Image (cartoon, rainbow, N blue to C red):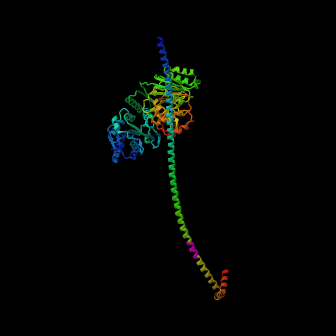
Amino acid sequence: MSDENLLELTRRETAELRLAEQLRAALKQRAAFELEVLNSRDHAMGRAAEIGELRYRLVKQAALYERRQSDFAVHDANHRSHIARLEAAMSTLAVHDANHRSHIARLEAAMSTHEREVASLEREVASLRNSTTWRLGRLLMSPVRAVKRLLRRS
Amino acid sequence: MPRFSIITPVYNPPRDAFEFCVSSVLSQTSADWEWCLANDASTDSWVASRLQELQRVDRRIRVVDRTTNGGIVAASNDAIALAEGEFLVLLDNDDELHADALALAAATLDREKMADYLYSDENKVSPDGRHFDDFAKPVWSPERLLAQNYTSHLSVLRRSLVEEVGRFRAGFDGSQDYDLVLRVIERARTVVNVPQVLYHWRSLPTSTASAASAKPYAFTAAMKAVREHLSRCGVAAEVTEAGPSLARVRRTSLYHPPVTVVLPIDGTTKRLFGVDTSLADNVARSLAEKTTYNNYRVVIVAAPTLAEDHVDAIASRFAGRITMLREERPFNLAQYFNAGLVACTTPLAVLLDQTCEFIHGDWLETLLGYSTREKVACVAPSIVDEFGIILSAGLGMTPEPHEIGRGRHTSDFGPLGMFAIARECMGVSTRCALVAVSTLKSVGGFSPEYTTRWFDFDLMCKLRRHGLHSIITPLAMVRTFDEELTFDEEELFARRWGRLYGDDPYTRIDTRLMAHNQVSRRLDESA
């Protein structure tokens, strides 16, 4: 083999070695890229899952709040109707109260009339007892009353 | 034409039970049904007269009287011959339907227009009317169906398809409905389930509802039905008994695809069976010496803490089939698995934890048997500790993330036999798991945000988001020396997937709460 051929062969072998080295480096780089793609994909899926989870919790929470809100609305309506019922009852009671008061006033007026009648009758009785006729009659009847007392004692 | 035709073969049922059955049909909230009954020459005199009376009372009830007793298959087929409905509803003569059974089935079928087969949850009803043993069934799980007839009751099948497959077949008495379902699903476009109890299975001393051993011939017929189903589907497999009413299907494939085993290692040593052992050495030895499958490569991802000569010693076990990756980052299982996945050159990979060692030599062949199933991302063996206690028989999310079967002995069949059979589940532990590389890459591999095994649960949820699931099989078992399960990173997990707590379509019951399972109880009773 001539020196030229030998040189060419050496050059080729060197180039081949360099290419092999480059290929190894490229393959290593490719593996690194693939790994990066894998990790990126996992990262994306992980974040998507987290978003999904947050959305799920949000929807669940929203549903919970909606349910609570509707519960509150029902409570509120119940309370309002209860208040309305109480107010109606109160106005009924006020009417009752007024009726009672006027009834009391009427009774009081009747009572004072009766009291006045009693006073005038009492006065009539007193003047009757102070009359000469009454006293004379009482004197005439005193022996009868004494006999009656004696009989009662025996 | 009514939508539902209820099919009931009748042969000397207990009178009370039959009246309950009648009443459950007549009180359906949906009126869109007809009831086709076949009296299989009952010898009890009241049966024929009662059936005639029913036929007179309600025009939707139709009865055929057989002159000779032909058995349940012949009687059921005679009842089907009367049917005009779009769907057939199978009802035994001593069982009951839930009052809303047909209404709920109709609502589901309205939603799922392509559904050809529908099944629901079921429970049992004692002779005194007490309901018990609710069976919350998983979503459509074809692998589980091969191991046990879990769909059973209530079954609603499209009539045209039943006619197409030739109705019930003779020779499968006791499991004739299982055989029919297996033939129907071969052609069904969609199978759906109603996750509500729509069927009450009467538990009488003579019925299979009370004990699997009540009708031993039924299980023989069931295994025959599975064998024939697999044969029709072109699947070479061996079907054996795994327990009471439980079958094991071991596929024997001639196809041996190349597989890459990804094995992250560091210099951890642990006292194993009284000897200080390097976990990396142990798993490498086990992999090299135990594995009978030949077409595999190994990608070892070595931590910077591992000495060069140690790495070389491990690599020498796999000469000619190894790629060694020296990591510069500190040991992190998720990151190392990802690096290994990137280096995979095969469509299938096995993720292997250095804490494992193999029990069965054919573990890889067994896992590969399930790899071609549709929508399956991972296949894993049962993971046990050195005392034969299960550490993971799949991952579950009901009511919270947990490893199914953890703490049970391998001899425990589990609730409804679920630890003894291959079945679909939401996820599996990747201590040892066969995965489809492209699928795993498409979901971003493992999340490096986790430093503990919570990345398994995270992966499970990512796969579920893509409509994928996993298969766990007890046919292969792997021993692990890592029994730790930390809960430190649950907060991070819950931040991502908290909404999935309690929402596991494959395990709808909290298996941890069941001290003894039904199958074990049956065994105890029969002992």
Q: Percent position (x, y) of residue B493?
A: 53, 37
Q: Where is residue B496 in the image (x, y as percent from the top left)?
A: 52, 38
User: Image height check: is B383 above or below B193?
Assistant: above
Q: Position of residue A15 (x, y in %)?
A: 49, 19
Question: Which quadrant of the rendered structure holds the N terminus of chain B?
Answer: top left
Q: Residue furthest front?
A: A4
Residue B136 in magenta stretch: no
Res A105 quadrant in image: bottom right
A4 relative position to B267: left or right: left
- Image coordinates for residue B317, horizontal then vertical, percent: 52, 20
Residue B120 lies in quadrant = top left
Residue range in magenta is A102-110
Front residue of this view, candidates A153 and B30? B30
Residue B310 can be seen, yes or no: yes
Q: Is residue A108 magenta?
A: yes
The number of numbered discs placed on residues in the rendered structure image is 0
Dominant secondary structure of the magenta stretch?
helix
Towards the viewer: A58 or B188: A58
Above or below A124: residue B465:
above
Residue drawn at (48%, 13%) of the image: A6
Residue A154 appears in view: no
Judging depth in this view, the residue of B280 and A26 nearest the camera is: A26
